[in-house]
Image: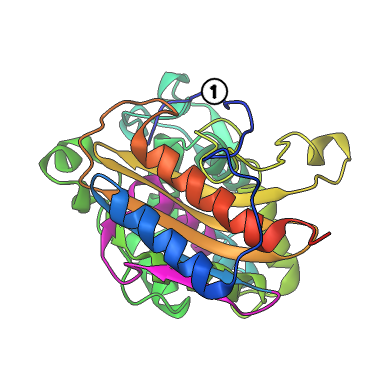
Amino acid sequence: MQPEVMQPEVMQPDGSEGMMAEPEALQARVEGMAAAFPGVAGVAAENLATGETVAVNEAVSFPTASMIKILVLFELVRQCAKGQAQLWERVTLRGADKTLGSGLLQDFDEGVTLTLRDLAVLMMGISDNTATNVLIDRLGKHAVNAAIREGGMWETELRNKIDFDKIRESNDTLAVGTPRDFARFMAALRREELLPGGYVEQMLGIMRIQKHTGFYLARYLPFNPYAFEFGEMPEAWVASKTGGLKGVRCEGGLVHSPRAEWSICVMTKDSEDTRWTADNVGCQFISQVSRTLYEEWGRDAS
């Protein structure tokens, strides 16, 4: 839901050398970061190589903002796996489909036809709100919520399509969820417990397209958003979705490094910082937590 911001220069969040920590020390460090956040912050992460977890306020409910688009994509791929939809299926854009906020389709001429994959790429790559609403109409809100439950998420709900009249009343009117739900979902997805392997990679491939919506998790990582399209294997990659509303920033997904992969979800709310820049305290918090985990789980021990 947030406007595009530029990727800042990669740096350590606190100027430290990033020393390896004991699991208890890592947990305590993230707890301290959350306690110092000027608002409410929650973190859940699982190292898929070791099973180690970090959890702070993981069961607190937060507005998901655009992070709910992960679950819209999941239901799209799930319907494709069941033969109920096809990524090449075409939809015609109507004037009534257009909505405010992030994306480009609101500026397209009505009558243009796009495939369901086109819509998914726009939804995940640039957080296009119109593409999201068209997909929710095609898939069904109840179907998305059924997929959420089948994905093992009991604290997450898509409540409405993107409607800023409702969002102005409350950030909770679009969707809510917990860091625990999203981190567990991404771990189960990666283990191919929710979709067949080819469909998992199809979903993650679309999630990796995200390039220009804040670089929250990836901001302080050795991350090149263009590596895959140039046929290169990046040192680290991120398959995720950000979310942002007034006083809210969040991101959930997977982080890959040469040493390990981990699922992660960082969510914030009730912040008084309303800036739509990478300096927003919520953005900074997500980036700093991400770098802290990378220093422990992702860097070569040598």
Would residue 179 be seen by someone viewing this image from the given angle?
yes
- Write the residue at 89% across / 40% down: 231
Residue that label 1 marks: 6
Q: Would residue 75 be found to the left or right of residue 230 on screen? A: left
> 294 and 44: which one is in front?
294
Give the residue at the far left of this rendering: 169
Colour convention of the picture: rainbow
Snapshot quadrant of residue 212: top right
Task: Please tell me whether residue 157 is drawn above or below residue 271 in the rendered image.
Answer: below
> At label 1, which amino acid type do we have?
Met
| The magenta stretch spans residue 155 | no
**In x, y percent, where is residue 196?**
69, 75
Q: Tell me if residue 57 is in the magenta stretch.
A: yes
Viewed as shown, does residue 280 lie left or right of 48? left
User: What residue is at 47 percent from the left and 38 percent from the top?
Assistant: 127
Find residue 209 and report its horizontal and vertical position in percent: 65, 41
Q: Which element is circle 1 on?
A: loop
Residue in view at x 80 percent, y 47 percent: 235
Q: Quadrant of the N terminus?
A: top left
Crowding at label 1, few (<14), some or many (≥20) Cα neighbours within 10 Å?
few
Residue 203 appears in the rendering: no
Residue 130: % across, % down: 40, 36
Q: What residue span does the magenta drawing correspond to? A: 49-75
Q: Which quarter of the figure has residue 28?
A: bottom left
Pick whichever, 165 or 264, lies toward us.
264
In the rendering, at what x and y percent does residue 15 appear? 57, 38
In the displayed orientation, state which residue is furthest to the right.
Answer: 231
